[in-house]
């Protein structure tokens, strides 16, 4: 199944100083977050990618055109470096299509502009390009493909550290509640979408803001609750937190990693069952 990744946004909240790299090219460890997302999908056998480029598209192209396998793979060097034998490979089986979808383009319009590359597909995967998870994508795909829905989104609890404030008409505070304690869910940015999406997505529109409400009204949109790991990389603070996880060896999104597989084998599955009536708040 093809994977459409939206990686053309400006990422203004991530930029600092004169840094002009697009947000998906911001690194976690030695590799950009875009690479981590692609490795996640490749772990489930999805190795055909369509990158919707915009701001910083040249940086994305150059990164893969000059890709160095030795950065993240063990290898044997002989003859003073004249011969390199890789002991593993990241992207040798990947097929990547690079498509310029414009600078100031909505997510929905970016998807419309890569439609010619999806004409032969009944369904495809899609991702924002700046979120990581350990969700069981294989099970999610199987569920969607055997249902009558048009699209699914990964629903996750809010991760922000802010608090909601409750107060009366006199403005006296009566309570404070952490966002993570609220009975709401947000859009996690991992989608499984069938080709019928193009029947409700018009030119210039947004995917979540315009097309998804139409699907919801038709009862063709499903939320997939996930209680496991999920993290955005929308700000420098969030990037720092992911870097800390990476350095500590606790990188739950790296399902392809032997170390992560060992950690998961030691943990019992205690994921609670979500109520189908829990409200889903979609963060666009």
Image (cartoon, rainbow, N blue to C red):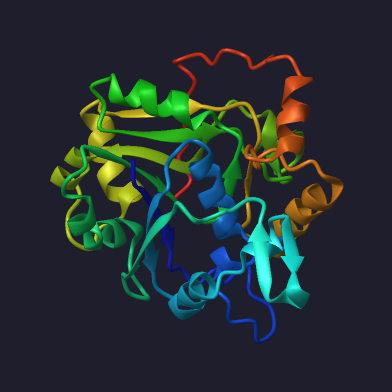
Tell me: 193 left or right of 269: left
Quarter of the view holding residue 174:
top right
- Give the vertical position of 179 relative to 62 (above or below): above
Image coordinates for residue 139, horizontal then vertical, percent: 45, 23
In front: 126, or 226? 126
Q: Residue furthest front?
A: 79
Image coordinates for residue 203, horizontal then vertical, percent: 18, 61
- Give the vertical position of 100 relative to 86 (above or below): below
In front: 35, or 232? 35
> Can residue 125 be seen by looking at this rendering?
yes
- Give the vertical position of 147 relative to 130 (above or below): above
Point 31% across, 50% down: residue? 207
Quadrant position of the N terminus in the picture = top left
Point 64% across, 45% down: residue? 231
Image coordinates for residue 175, horizontal then vertical, percent: 75, 32
In front: 256, or 210? 256
Q: Residue furthest right?
A: 248
Tell me: 25 left or right of 49: right
> Can residue 27 be seen by looking at this rendering?
no
Q: How many marks?
A: 0
Q: Residue furthest bottom?
A: 18
Point 55% across, 55% down: residue? 130
In front: 2, or 129? 2
Image coordinates for residue 226, horizontal then vertical, percent: 56, 27
Point 55% across, 48% down: residue? 39
């Amino acid at each position: 199944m093809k994977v459409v990744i939206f990686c053309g946004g400006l990422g203004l909240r991530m930029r600092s100083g004169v840094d002009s790299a697009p947000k998906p090219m911001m690194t976690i460890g030695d590799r950009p977050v875009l690479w981590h997302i692609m490795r996640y999908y490749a772990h489930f056998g999805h190795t055909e990618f369509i990158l919707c480029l915009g701001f910083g598209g040249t940086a994305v192209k150059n990164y893969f055109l000059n890709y160095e396998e030795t950065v993240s793979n063990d290898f044997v060097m002989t003859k003073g470096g004249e011969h390199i034998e890789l002991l593993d490979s990241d992207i040798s089986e990947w097929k990547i299509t690079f498509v310029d979808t414009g600078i100031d383009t909505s997510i929905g319009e970016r998807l419309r502009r890569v439609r010619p590359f999806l004409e032969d597909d009944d369904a495809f995967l899609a991702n924002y390009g700046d979120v990581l998870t350990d969700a069981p994508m294989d099970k999610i795909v199987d569920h969607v493909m055997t249902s009558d829905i048009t699209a699914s989104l990964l629903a996750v609890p809010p991760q922000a550290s802010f608090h909601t404030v409750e107060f009366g008409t006199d403005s006296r505070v009566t309570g404070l509640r952490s966002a993570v304690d609220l009975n709401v869910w947000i859009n996690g940015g991992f989608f499984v979408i069938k080709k019928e999406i193009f029947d409700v997505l018009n030119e210039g529109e947004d995917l979540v803001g315009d097309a998804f409400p139409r699907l919801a009204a038709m009862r063709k949109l499903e939320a997939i609750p996930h209680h496991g790991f999920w993290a955005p990389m929308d700000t420098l603070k969030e990037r720092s937190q992911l870097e800390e996880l990476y350095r500590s060896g606790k990188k739950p999104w790296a399902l392809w990693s032997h170390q992560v597989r060992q950690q998961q084998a030691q943990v019992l599955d205690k994921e609670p069952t979500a109520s189908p009536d829990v409200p889903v708040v979609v963060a666009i």
